[in-house]
Image (spheres, rainbow, N blue to C red):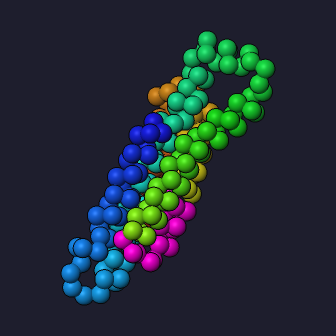
């Protein structure tokens, strides 16, 4: 799953950034301004696309990491080891965070190299992408872990995760509808 997420990010950010900021594509006008506009469009598109991918991957990662909790034999075996439950939880949670942060930092560095190759000087947008991606990863992973620990069933964990994350949108929509009418 980590490699799949890394490949998706590779094609979403560095490859599209290289394609859109290549100096050979811009024949007339101000090259720096056109490249800056391309970088901003590429990063904005990748922020929204990455949020959807993080939303899906967070629950998959959590169910893979804490999947032993849904099988009685596996759960009894893991908890019979000389490791405390706090340590098991912390290790699983940190593994989930590393699943996200590792590829994001790596793609940030690769994207920086792409910008250096294409002579793009405005790379602060890439840093914004990295910070937003890390915060979104933390929030979605935390909610996935919460709903995974709350439920005792894989299907229930998935339903709680989706409903819990879309509950804010539904409540906001209802409040706006009541206020506007």
Left of 57 or right of it: where is 139? right
Is residue 59 one of those drawn in magenta?
no
Residue 155 image offset from top left, x and y in percent: 46, 28
Query: Residue sitting at 64 percent across and 18 percent down?
Result: 75
Residue 39 image offset from top left, x and y in percent: 37, 71
Image quarter in which the N terminus is found: top left
Query: For residue 42, which quarter of the picture?
Result: bottom left
Query: Residue sitting at 46 percent across and 48 percent down?
Result: 54
Residue 90 image offset from top left, x and y in percent: 70, 37
Please, which residue is most extreme toward the left here?
27
Q: Is residue 181 above or below residue 141?
A: below
Q: Say if residue 153 shows up in the picture.
A: yes
Q: Nearer the viewer, residue 116 or 134?
A: 116
Q: Is residue 125 above or below residue 175?
A: below
Q: Is residue 172 above or below residue 153?
A: below
Q: Nearer the viewer, residue 51 or 180?
A: 51
Query: Residue sitting at 50 percent across and 59 percent down?
Result: 109
Please, which residue is most extreme toward the front here?
117
Q: Is residue 71 above or below residue 5?
A: above
Left of 126 or right of it: where is 46? left
Q: Nearer the viewer, residue 58 or 148?
A: 58
Left of 165 or right of it: where is 181? left
Query: Residue sitting at 59 percent across and 44 percent down?
Result: 98
- Magenta stretch, main secondary structure, is helix
Q: Which residues are magenta?
A: 118-133
Residue 97 image offset from top left, x and y in percent: 59, 45
Image quarter in which the C terminus is found: bottom left
Query: For residue 82, which quarter of the picture?
Result: top right
């Amino acid at each position: 799953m980590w490699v799949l997420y890394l490949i998706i990010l590779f094609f979403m950010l560095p490859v599209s950034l290289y394609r859109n900021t290549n100096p050979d594509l811009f024949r007339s006008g101000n090259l720096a301004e056109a490249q800056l506009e391309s970088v901003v469009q590429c990063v904005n598109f990748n922020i929204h696309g990455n949020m959807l991918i993080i939303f899906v991957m967070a629950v998959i990662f959590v169910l893979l990491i804490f999947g032993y909790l849904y099988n009685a034999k596996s759960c009894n075996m893991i908890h019979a080891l000389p490791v405390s439950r706090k340590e098991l939880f912390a290790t699983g949670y940190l593994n989930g965070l590393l699943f996200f942060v590792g590829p994001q930092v790596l793609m940030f560095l690769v994207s920086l190299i792409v910008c250096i190759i294409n002579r793009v000087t405005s790379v602060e947008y890439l840093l914004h992408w990295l910070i937003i991606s890390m915060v979104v990863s933390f929030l979605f992973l935390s909610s996935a872990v919460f709903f995974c620990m709350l439920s005792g069933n894989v299907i229930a964990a998935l339903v709680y995760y989706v409903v819990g994350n879309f509950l804010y949108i539904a409540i906001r929509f209802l409040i706006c509808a009541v206020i506007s009418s």
